[in-house]
Structure formats: C-alpha cells, structure tokens
Image: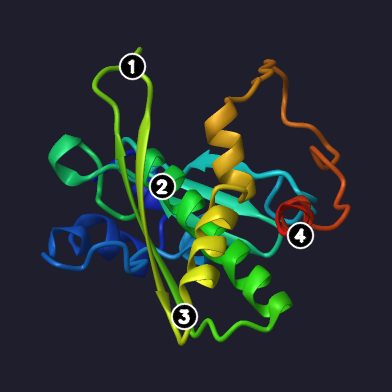
Amino acid sequence: MQEGAASLSPKLRRAQDGAFDKPGLGWLGLVTLEWLPMSSDPFAQKDLGESVLVSETRLGRLQMAARGQGWSFLADEPRLVGGLGSGPDPYDLLSSALGACTAMTLRLYADHKGWPLERVQVGVLHHRASLEARDLFERTISLEGQLDDDQRQRLLEIADKCPVHRTLDRGSDIRTVLSPLPEAPLQPASGSAHMRDMQEAGT
C-alpha cells in the first residue's frame, strides 16, 4: 500500500490498488477529484479566479489534480512509464488545448457569420525530436456542413488565429517564483481571457 493510503476511503483505495490495471479504460475518470482527500489543501475551498492549481494526489508517483474555477481533472503518465494512466499527460494537454481552442474559435466565427457549420473536429499530433528541438503540432480539421470552398478556406485561416495557436507559435515568457501557498487568489476573476482573445481572432 502506498504512502497515505491508510487515510483513504475504501472506494478510493480500491481505485488506487486495482482499477488502473483494467485494460481499455483510458481516461474515464476512475478516480474523480471529489474522492481525493482535500482537508489539507488550503485551496480546496478557495476561489482561484482565472488561476490554475496543480497538486500531487499522492496516488502513484505522477498523478496530479488540476483545479480551476468550477472544474477539475487528473493529469498523469501511462503505466508503461510509471504512472497510473488515469489522465492525459502534459503534452496531451497542450495538444488538447490547441484542438479545443481551434474548434471553439471556428464555432464562434461560423455562428457570427451565420454559416451552416454543423460540427467541428480537430485532431492534433505533437512531435519533438529532443528536449532542445522545436515542437511540431500537426493539426487536422474536419468541418461538417454545407460549406462552400470560400467558407472552408476562410475557416482554415481563422484556425491559425485561435489564441492557443498564437501562444504556441510565438512562444511565451514564463516567470517562476518560489513562495508559500498564498491566502488570496493568484489572479482575480475578470471574465474569460480566452473568450476575449477568440472574439478578437474573428475580427
């Protein structure tokens, strides 16, 4: 039994000890965050604003709980590399962010134009030859609906303007500090910056 398991509920202990051995279950949320012991987490009942908090769950070596304003999920690594396979790995999250942002931006633009876009699907494959190599995200967009060639071409152009595409394409500055957990939200809620940037992309 792993460290900290004695304090877990029987339901959570069963999930920790055996559920992730079942094949084919993927990221179906076998351990949901409401099962996790949060009493020692000073952010458990706090308003995070637009900030994201990622914490170790102490289940396995690499499982992390990510929390934000009104949502939560698990991040992990596959069992083959020492994880529990309970959630996407960080590169999967980057690919998912690009795919989701692309689809959302296209949906907002098509709705604004009144175009008959029935459904968007975005596939993303991430490559990097080494830690120092430049990343490549291969993105495949499927547009369902009675769209003409000009509309499809315009949506392809709008995809390159989605906020996450621009973030990844131009690079970012990251500022890191060591500090105790703050008592106040890391950033006050001020609406969705992502929604603002998607709307700007379509102008």
* Badge 2 or badge 3: first in the primary sequence: 2
Residue under pointer 2: 95
Q: Quadrant of the N terminus?
A: top left
Which residue is located at x 35 percent, y 33 percent? 136
Alpha carbon of mark 1 to alpha carbon of mark 4: how far?
32 Å
For mark 1, does the 10 Å Cα neighbourhood hold few (<14), some (14 to 19), or many (20 or more) residues? few
Q: Earlier in the sequence, mark 4 or mark 3?
A: 3
> Considering depth in this image, is 67 or 130 the residue closer to the camera?
130
Q: Amino acid at mark 4?
A: Gln
| Position of residue 34 in the picture relative to residue 76 (left or right) | right
Residue displayed at 46% across by 80% down: 119
Quadrant where the C terminus lies?
bottom right
First along the sequence among labels 3 and 1: 3
When asked about the image quadrant of residue 173, the answer is: top right
Q: Are marks 3 and 1 in contact (CB under 8 Å)?
A: no
Q: What residue is shown with label 3? A: 119
Q: Residue flagged by tag 1: what amino acid is it?
A: Ala
Q: Which residue is mark 1?
A: 133
Residue located beneath label 4 in the image: 199
User: Mark 3 falls on what kind of element?
Assistant: strand
